[in-house]
């Protein structure tokens, strides 16, 4: 199942994505909530598991599949080759930071370049959406708490992040978390441990990695975070980026107005965002 939010910003509706178009779920279920906490706690994943209806052609805007996450938790240095390209030691446990909800952005929306920081960079990442609340979740039970997966670009302002030592600021500018194109449920994915991730900038391949290079697996990440941070339905966990970001290139490559970044993950799809003056 591939869940989407579609429509103009602030007026998105839940839908299902099909090869020949979309299904407007609110047309069939007028009381269905937006894809977020109430959607998951209301059992809509289960209710929709066998639902089918004719799809309609669609060429409008897609919004972020999850509209109101309480938390967007991200991992640093979770791909061995990425840690190596930055000259970092491998972390002994998941290295966590957060992006704030103002970063939410649609899979094909523009990303706003900030005025207070330069050195804007890309990071293709596999994002996990929590569907069932939990605390102190064991690795063996972790995937039972997952609603599905998305592509996310963990856009980063390196000047703020590194030169100013402000990770929060550098990661949380408006529009800095484009995600989608759909929330893909686990049954659509063959092997989480063997998914190819790529990022292209203006058509040039910059990142080409595989989830096999992840230091901490998704069950390990969920278990670690949930030890003393309760995970709620709709929370997003972005699991780190492979090698090939711009700041660690020689010379560094950073984004400017007009650049287009295309992030893809096998089985999940592609998001594509133009960077524009903010």
Image (cartoon, grey):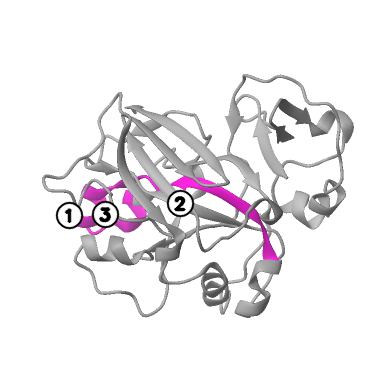
Can residue 137 be seen here? no
Q: Residue at x 84, y 26 (%)?
A: 54
Q: Earlier in the sequence, mark 3 or mark 2?
A: 3
50 on left or right of 234: right
Evaluate whether residue 83 shows in this view: yes
Q: Is residue 30 above or below residue 148?
A: above
CB contact under 8 Å: marks 2 and 1: no
Choose mark 2 or mark 1, whichever is in front. Answer: 2
Residue at the image position 53 percent from the left and 34 percent from the top: 106
Give the camera-side residue of 6 and 38. Answer: 6
SS of the residue under disc 3: helix
Packing grade of label 3 (10 A; few <14, some 14-19, many >=20) is some
- For the residues marked 3 and 1, what is the alpha-carbon distance in whole angstroms? 6 Å
- Left or right placement of residue 54 versus residue 115 in this view: right
- The quadrant holding residue 273 is top left
Q: Is residue 251 above or below residue 80?
A: above
Identify the residue under disc 2: 196
In the image, 228 versus 81, the foreground residue is 81
On residue 163, the disc is: 1
Going by the image, does 241 lie left or right of 102?
Answer: left
The percent position of residue 277, horizontal first and vertical second, equals: 31, 26
Instruction: Read off the magenta span.
Output: 145-170
């Amino acid at each position: 199942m591939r869940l989407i939010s579609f429509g103009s910003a602030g007026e998105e509706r839940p839908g299902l994505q099909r090869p020949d178009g979309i299904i407007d779920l609110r047309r069939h279920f007028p009381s269905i909530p937006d894809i977020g906490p109430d959607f998951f706690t209301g059992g809509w994943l289960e209710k929709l598991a066998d639902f089918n209806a004719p799809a309609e052609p669609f060429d409008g805007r897609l919004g972020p599949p999850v509209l109101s996450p309480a938390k967007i938790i991200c991992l640093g240095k979770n791909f061995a080759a990425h840690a190596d390209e930055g000259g970092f030691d491998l972390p002994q446990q998941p290295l966590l930071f957060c992006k704030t909800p103002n970063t939410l952005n649609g899979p094909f929306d523009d990303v706003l370049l900030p005025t207070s920081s330069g050195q804007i960079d890309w990071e293709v990442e596999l994002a996990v959406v929590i569907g069932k609340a939990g605390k102190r979740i064991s690795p063996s039970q972790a995937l039972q708490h997952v609603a599905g997966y998305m592509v996310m670009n963990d856009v980063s302002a390196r000047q703020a992040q590194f030169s100013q030592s402000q990770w929060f600021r550098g990661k949380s500018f408006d529009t800095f978390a484009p995600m989608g194109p759909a929330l893909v449920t686990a049954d659509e994915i063959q092997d989480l441990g063997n998914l190819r991730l790529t990022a292209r900038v203006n058509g040039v391949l910059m990142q080409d990695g595989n989830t096999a290079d992840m230091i901490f697996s998704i069950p390990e990440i969920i278990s670690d975070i949930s030890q003393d941070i309760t995970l709620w339905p709709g929370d997003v966990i972005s699991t780190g980026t492979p090698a090939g970001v711009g700041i660690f290139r020689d010379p560094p490559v950073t984004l400017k107005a007009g650049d287009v970044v295309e992030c893809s993950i096998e089985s999940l799809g592609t998001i594509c965002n133009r960077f524009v003056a903010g």
